[in-house]
Amino acid sequence: MNAPPLRLGVNIDHVATVRNARGGFHPDPIRAANMAVLAGADGITAHLREDRRHIRDQDMERLKRNLFVPLNFEMAATAEMVEIATRIRPNACCLVPEKREERTTEGGLDIIGQGAHLRPVIQELKDLGIRVSLFVEPEIEVMDAACELGAPVVELHTGTYCEVGDEEERAHELERLRRAAEHGAKIGLEIHAGHGLSFDTVRPVAAIPQIVELNIGHFLVGEAIFMGLDEAVRCMRVAMDEGRAQIT
Ligand code: PXP
């Protein structure tokens, strides 16, 4: 099988987390983004949260001005974020659920229950020429709902697959991802995946032929402490390519 190439989007949120721990400007997430691109990232992802706990408005503006690769703006589907996206014009917007009390995005969007709210947001962003993706659970009916809402892309939540300790459960979660990717692609969706991926978990996901983009952040920024960001991105790229090469 000739699988399409697999892009790597590097999420630089947690470079901003470290910067914000002390205030000031160091480490600069835009410098990290440029370094990730030189090391092989195909795009940069940043999540502007309602509470601005990591990425801030000015970071998004600087990223858009300084990057030579596509910028993927992760955001909640709120009027405030749509206004910011309208001003900044990222290449892509990934709509995510957001709760103030969560440490990270804990689950996919409830696109079946929230369809009426999401539909006009998707349309408004699409009308601006922005590629819209929905961060969702890997379920067949969720793929159908995304398609019905007019979203061109879904990003499958890999968090549960990455978190389970048990081999059998992990195989089950991987199968859910495979089935959702296969069905989603069949009905015309572009399939991305992300959340919690590491050197240990990325290969089987990269081996799902319908997936064309992975978005990875926390592990890479953490690993950068030990091997440097440049090397962490390069090693992730190698692991992804190894996974992709398993497709027969
Ligand atoms: N994709 C989405 C939609 C996310 O919300 C996140 C976390 O911000 C990621 C990918 C990256 O997850 P991680 O930082 O665990 O690699």
Image (cartoon, grey):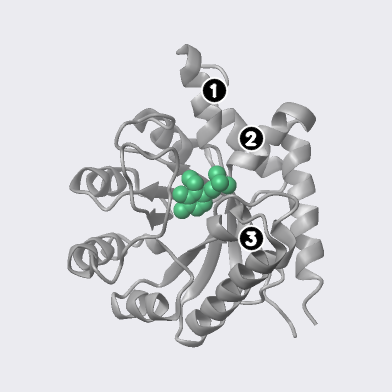
Residue labelled 2 has its Cβ within 8 Å of some atom of ligand 1: yes
Sequence order check, earlier mark of 3 and 2: 3
**Placement of 138 over or under 2, stated as above or below:** above
The image quarter containing residue 204 is bottom right
Quadrant, the C terminus: bottom right
Instruction: Tell me: residue 199, above or below residue 207.
Output: above
The type of residue carrying mark 1 is Val
Counting other residues with Cα less than 10 Å from the Cα at mark 3, is it few (<14), some (14-19), or many (20 or more)? some
- Give, as a three-letter code, the residue at label 2: Val
Q: Which residue is mark 1?
A: 18
> Foreground mark, 3 or 1?
1
Which-is-in-front pick, marks 3 and 2?
Answer: 2
- Residue 221 lies, in percent from the top left, at 64, 35
- Is there CB contact under 8 Å for labels 2 and 1? yes
Locate residue 189 relative to residue 3 in the image: left or right.
left
Residue 119, how many percent across, how many down?
Answer: 23, 68
- At mark 2, the secondary structure is helix
| Left or right of residue 162, residue 187 in this image | left
Q: Label 3 is placed on what type of residue?
A: Arg
Distance of label 3 from label 2 (alpha carbons): 18 Å
Which dot marks residue 221?
2
Dot 1 crowding, Cα within 10 Å, few <14, some 14–19, many 20+: some
- Of labels 2 and 1, earlier in sequence is 1
Provide residue 190's location: percent of width, then percent of height: 50, 73
Is any atom of residue 71 visible in this view?
no
Quadrant for residue 95, please give it: bottom left
C-alpha gap between disc 2 and disc 1? 10 Å
Query: Which residue matches tag 3?
Result: 7
Q: Residue at x 46, y 77 (%)?
A: 189
